[in-house]
Image: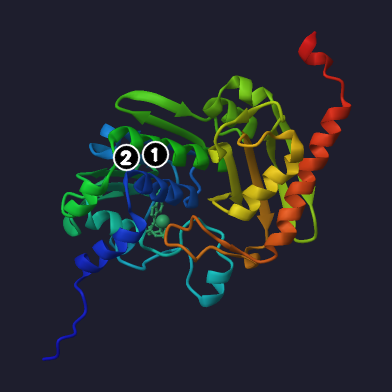
Amino acid sequence: MGKIHELNNVLANQIAAGEVIERPASIIKELVENSLDAHSKRIDIVVTKAGLGELRVIDDGDGIATEDVKEAFKRHATSKISTRQDLFRVQTMGFRGEALPSIASVADVVMTTATGGASGTMIHFHGGELKDFQAAPARRGTDVKVSELFFNTPARLKYLKSPQTELSRMVDIINRLALANPDVAISFTHDGREMFRSAGNGNVQQVIAAIYGVKVGRKMLAIHGADPDFTVDGLVSLPELTRASGQYMTITINHRYVRNYQLTKAIIEGYGSKLMVGRYPVVVVNIDLDPLLVDVNVHPAKREVRLSKEQQLATLISTTIQQKIAQQNLIPDVGERA
Ligand code: ADP
Ligand code: MG
């Protein structure tokens, strides 16, 4: 017998979880992205104790057929891509097939799901072990309950920050998901208190108002710019409305929230001297592009992406914002004074 052997499944999944599931907020991100991929119109997020109690995501999406439910919890099992070509034109939030097995390997997970057929399915995992699998109510959609997070990976549990910090990371990711998906009604309840709710009517300005306050919502300008490769749409704050931190800028690519230094810089450059040093605007922009121009498979959590023609896009963003703000200066500000 040689010394080298394949890792068992649970162990392999726990290792994968190290990359995808860092903290309670990662679970929310992965579960809500799954709900979005399943064409949900409504997603309710219910959390207790900043995620150390229970994390629950309930959607009204496609659901999973009984024969697929166990598959969904296998590593690299996905319904979203199948060929190499698909990988280059990913349209969904997920495609790696890692989230469910990763979560199930480091927590207690109960999923109830139904496609709208005669019956639904319930499946229960504890630390990667299948505990239960049976018929459940036929209500269309999926309900995933995660508890005892990191009970079997003590180092990971210890690494978590204070409940306030974990909660604020969760709020941040929920805000971004809601801003990126204004046509989906998203709610967030923490310890029995509703923290946030979006209407799901497609109005980004209303989502901004729900998150950052009605006053901020009123001080936004709509932008639109396009070139042969990219279309940029969004809302940017009037130069008078700024924040001391850059975290109020949300960039989405084909409605996927991303972090990208060059594009963030392009937004700030669009404001030019209108922005004081150390001040940042409130911005929500979506960039529509051919999926061939973006590689989302750079980072397991898909937060960072690699863009072709990044400089061209940066220029489009900054000129679009610059022009809008220059135009705005020509309109006398009578409304505000009256
Ligand atoms: P991925 O999203 O990368 O495909 P996941 O492990 O997150 O991998 O999910 C595995 C599969 O389970 C998905 O491809 C999808 O078919 C199914 N699934 C997961 N969550 C949901 C959901 N909320 N509604 C419908 N199907 C789901
Ligand atoms: Mg997924």
Residue placed farthest to the left in the image? 1
Q: Quadrant of residue 223?
A: top right
Q: Which residue is mark 1?
A: 170
The picture places residue 230, in percent across and down from the top left corner, at 73, 56
Identify the residue at horizontal 50%, vertical 75% (top origin): 83
Residue that appears at 32% across and 47% down: 23
Toward which corner of the image does residue 275 lie, by quadrant? top right
The crowding category of the residue bearing disc 2, from other C-alpha atoms within 10 Å (few below 14, some 14 to 19, many at least 20), is: many
Residue designated by label 2 = 56
Quadrant location of residue 208? top right
Q: Residue furthest top?
A: 338
Q: Within 10 angstroms of label 1, few (less than 14), some, or many (20 or more) residues?
A: many
Amino acid type, label 2:
Arg
In this rendering, the answer to whether 32 lies above or below 198 is: below
Quarter the C terminus occupies = top right
Residue name at image x 48 percent, y 48 percent: 36
Q: Position of residue 319 (x, y in %)?
A: 79, 47
Report whether 247 appears left or right of 64.
right
Write the residue at 23% across / 58% down.
Answer: 105
Residue 177 place in picture, x, y as percent: 50, 42
Real-space Cα separation, disc 1 to disc 2, in angstroms: 13 Å
The quadrant where ligand 1 appears is: bottom left
Helix or strand or loop: what does disc 1 sit on?
A: helix
